[in-house]
Image (tube, rainbow, N blue to C red):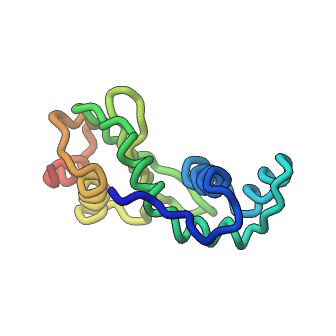
């Protein structure tokens, strides 16, 4: 991996790196980061933090993704009926055996293609297939298991 170059910037690389790391590690907005840095006496606009995130963010995101632990070999796939604004929706959730949520998907349809979508998305995102998939034995789960 290539080293990130901070040359030509006014702020020290520790401040820029920390701001970008905070943005990608936690669900913070650029304005939240501006306020956090201001509390520590660092006067930076949110536009500057946004530029740093665009320039250096991909490398930080890769590092964070690589440092995450791999999911366990056994996954739990479940489907829940939820009501959003009075409309019935279907929430699909995949969790590994250690309790880490792997993926969540909300859809308005419940058919074969809708059942395949969360599993295909999950397999593509994780890059590996599980040893075992545990479901709640609904009829739609059979279609999702075909993707494995």
The quadrant where residue 54 appears: bottom right
- On screen, residue 102 above or below 32: above
Task: Give coordinates of residue 104: x percent, y percent.
Answer: 43, 51
**Nearer to the camera, 33 or 82:** 33
Task: Give coordinates of residue 125: x percent, y percent.
Answer: 30, 55
Instruction: Tell me: 46 left or right of 83.
Output: right
Q: Residue at x 76, y 62 (%)?
A: 31
- Residue 136 visible, this angle: no
Q: Residue at x 49, y 63 (%)?
A: 5
Count of residue discs? 0
**Nearer to the camera, 7 or 80:** 7
Q: Residue at x 78, y 68 (%)?
A: 45
Q: Quadrant where the N terminus lies?
A: bottom left
Task: Give coordinates of residue 107: x percent, y percent.
Answer: 42, 62
- Residue 42 visible, this angle: yes
Instruction: Tell me: 125 left or right of 82.
Output: left
Q: Residue at x 47, y 55 (%)?
A: 60
Task: Give coordinates of residue 132: x percent, y percent.
Answer: 18, 34
């Amino acid at each position: 991996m290539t080293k990130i170059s901070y040359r030509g910037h006014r702020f020290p690389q520790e401040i820029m790196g920390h701001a970008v790391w905070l943005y990608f590690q936690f669900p913070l907005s650029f304005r939240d980061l501006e306020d956090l840095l201001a509390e520590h006496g660092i006067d930076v606009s949110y536009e500057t933090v946004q530029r740093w995130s665009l320039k250096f963010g991909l490398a930080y995101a890769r590092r964070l993704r690589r440092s995450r632990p791999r999911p366990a070999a056994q996954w739990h796939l479940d489907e829940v009926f939820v009501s959003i604004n009075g409309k019935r929706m279907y929430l699909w959730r995949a969790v590994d055996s250690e309790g880490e949520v792997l993926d969540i998907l909300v859809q308005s349809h419940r058919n074969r293609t809708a059942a395949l979508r969360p599993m295909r998305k999950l397999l593509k995102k994780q890059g590996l297939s599980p040893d075992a998939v545990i479901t709640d034995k609904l009829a739609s789960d059979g279609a999702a298991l075909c993707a494995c």
